[in-house]
Amino acid sequence: MKEPMKKLTVLSFYKDKDEVTQQLQILGMIHPEEGKKIDSDNIESLEDQRIQIQKAIDYIDTFSVTGNTGAKGIPDKTITDIVTDIQHLRHKLDENIKNQESLEKEMPRAKIWGDFNRKKIRILKNQGIVLRYFIAKNKYYKRFDFSAISHFVIHEENGKIYFVVISYKDEAYNLPFEQRKLPKFLPSEIISQQKKLRSEEETLIRKLQKRTVYIPALKNELLTIHNLIEFQKVSHSFSSSENGKIMVIKGWYPEKIEKELLKSLEKLKITFFLSEPTQSDQVPIQLYNNRYSRIFEPVTRIFQLPNYHEFDLTPMIAVFYPIFFAYCLGDAGYGLVLVLISVAGGMTFLKNSKKIAVFGALLGGFTAVMGIVKSGNVFGIPLSNTSEVPLFQFLAQYVLIPDNQNFMFNAFNVALMIGVVQILVGVITSVFKKIVYQSFTHSISQIGKFMIICGILLIFLADMQNIQELKPYLPLARIALFSGIALVLLFHDLSLSILKRIGSGLLPLFFIFTGILGDVLSYVRLFALGVVSSVLGLVVNQIGMQIIPNGWWGIILGIAFMLFGHSLNLALAVLGAVVHPLRLTFVEFYNNAQFEGGGIEYKPFRHVTNTNNYKFKS
């Protein structure tokens, strides 16, 4: 559901514009309507400062030490100096780590040639003696005739020989081996430099840890910049009247706060008037749903918020999405595990993300029930094959959707039925959307689409599937089909003349007829993913049970294999159960509900004073 919104238009004398903007910011209830595009060097400068400060906060926050709550007083440096200092330390630490990584890569090569004496090599060179360094595969080295060549082996590793050839300058040996240069550093030099760099790294880290005391001051400065940027943006949103002396700004507020808003505006002595939104207005959206539907608002936000002139589909997503998820995951044991992980997460690693924990527990609960109702699987064990276990025997009586192909309401058919129901709900939603936000006449073509789908469905079941109970309704189905075609042809585009409308109506009909088949068959994925999850779980159990009888080590290995196999299967199944219902929602359901989206979230213009009320982003 969406909160009803109203428009507020504020008038101000041009000299009082900044004062009125400041009053609106303190008021903190109005979502300003965007004005002309802002091209301000001041705002760009503030944005750049914000980015630099945010990067500094994010970086030094990684060096926070437990118990260091930060400085609460005024810092001994300016914010600019603090940020510059952090950037400098970061650059030095990055350079240090880079040098350590470079030395780490150099060490294996240096070890090959050992701690050679550079001074003696230079003396030999001055006396006309040349040392050349080669690498050769062991077999090729042994085949080569070195009888006339002075050389000695330095190192042997991984089937390769590293050796040095000694000759005078005027001697030229053409050897069929890869020649190498001596490494830049000796192993002892690398070790010495590594110790020095590690010591410098520890010093830099301690310095950065000390800088964490500036985090509160940096966050407060970030809030100040945020408020300045918002002030500048709103100030630029004012438009001038014809004489240029009266400035106008428009904004939006939820209707439920109107009384409080009016009292505040009267106290501030601001000139204003109120109005209802029109069809052309870009009205911000504030969702409000019951406690259950609110859990699924993040799913709605993944795609887009609805615009103000259509329904919020969150309550319908709250009905279908958990059913789709549970149908895809399809194992009661996995559902129970998901509940336990979510509950444990809510008390530990998801303590700051309670909504995710509740969402996971809810989906797990639906899966635990659906795993029994559909096919009856518990950790890949079919309930129908385990009648000797009392608990499974008890649960087996609640299997209402078996995998039996001879049963009308089997898992495959029910998946398609769920799809048909959601498609019809989507079409009905689009009908009411047209009636509420446009007119009944605009909804007639969607009523026609609904009649076409119902007609085709009845004909398919009664005639092609030979369901005797539906045979008497065949004439009614044909009437609905042809009447629906007529309604689509005559009312699909009211902006055209009647003849052009009929001619161009063939394309919408084509999309309706082809879309019905494609949309319904898309819901087969609900069945397919559930089958894959169950089969993989069954295979894991069978392999594990074959390993267990092989003594005590077989018991340990078998149990470990089943734990690993089921964990991997659960992870893959959850991934599919999250993604594919989203696709069915955002493609099939949204398309049939004629969801347009494009809504912008209601964000009141207010002066933020508390870091807890501000979302820090990189």
Image (tube, rainbow, N blue to C red):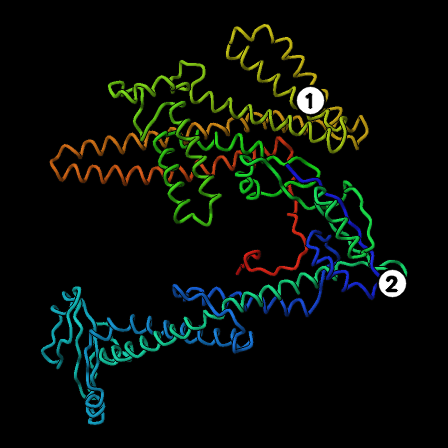
In the image, residue 386 sits, relative to residue 548, either above or below, namely: above
Q: Residue 512 in the image: x percent, y percent?
A: 63, 26
Residues under numbered marks 2 and 1 in contact, where contact means CB atoms less than 8 Å apart: no
Question: Which residue is at the front of the view, 69 or 369?
Answer: 69
Horizontal relation, residue 238 to residue 377: left or right: right
Question: Which residue is at the front of the view, 421 or 405?
Answer: 421
Question: Which residue is at the front of the view, 472 or 67?
Answer: 67
In the image, residue 97 sits, relative to residue 429, either above or below, namely: below
Q: Residue 85 in the image: x percent, y percent?
A: 49, 76
Q: CA distance from mark 2 to mark 1?
A: 55 Å
Residue at image coords 62%, 66%? 225
Residue at numbered disc 2: 245
Residue at image coords 36%, 17%? 397
Horizontal relation, residue 291 to residue 390: left or right: right
Q: Residue 454 in the image: x percent, y percent?
A: 61, 18
Question: Which residue is at the front of the view, 487 or 158?
Answer: 487
- Tell me the quarter of the picture where residue 206 sits: bottom left
SS at badge 2: loop
Dot placed on the residue nearer the N-terminal end, 2 or 1: 2
The residue positioned farthest toward the left in the image shown:
147
- Type of the residue with mark 2: Lys
Residue at numbered disc 1: 448
Please give the count of numbered marks on the rendered protein: 2
Horizontal relation, residue 33 to residue 223: left or right: right
Query: Which marked residue is nearer to the observer: mark 2 or mark 1?
Result: 2
Residue at image coords 22%, 94%? 126
- Tell me the quarter of the picture where residue 17 sits: bottom right
